Image (spheres, grey):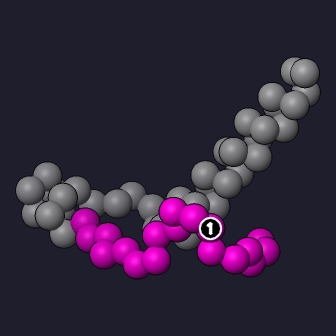
Amino acid sequence: MRYIEKQKGDILHTFADISKAKRLLNYQPKVELREGLEKEVAWLKEKVTNSCLLM
């Protein structure tokens, strides 16, 4: 990962909160955020690699 300067449109602050989804929908995440992000990155890398092989 490398740091880059802020880009136009970047979100400076977030107030993300899933408590309403937990309360109203009985939502409970199945994986921790870090694990989910790692899985997403691995999936994206695989898709990019496979799409490049098709070209």
Q: Report x, y in % for residue 11.
A: 46, 70
- Residue 28's x, y, as percent? 27, 60
* Residue at (31% x, 75% y) in the render: 15
Instruction: Pinpoint residue 46: horizontal percent, then vertical percent.
Output: 76, 41
**In this rendering, would 52 be left or right of 14?**
right
Residue under the point 52% across and 67% down: 10
Q: Quadrant of the N terminus?
A: bottom right
Q: Magenta segment range?
A: 1-18
User: Relative to 16, is 42 above or below?
Assistant: above
Q: Quadrant of residue 4?
A: bottom right
The residue drawn where x is 25% and y is 66% is 18
Identified at 91% across, 27% down, the residue is: 53
Side of 29 where 27 appears, left or right = left
Q: What's the magenta bit mostly, secondary-structure-wise?
A: loop
In what quadrant of the picture does the C terminus appear? top right
The local secondary structure at tag 1 comes to loop
Q: Is residue 3 magenta?
A: yes
Task: Confirm whether residue 35 shows in the render.
Answer: no
Q: Is residue 11 toward the left or the right of residue 55 in the image? A: left
Given the image, on which type of amino acid does mark 1 rest?
Gln
In which quarter of the view is residue 21 placed?
A: bottom left
Residue of label 1 = 7
Any part of residue 40 in sight: yes
Percent position of residue 16, x then y: 32, 70
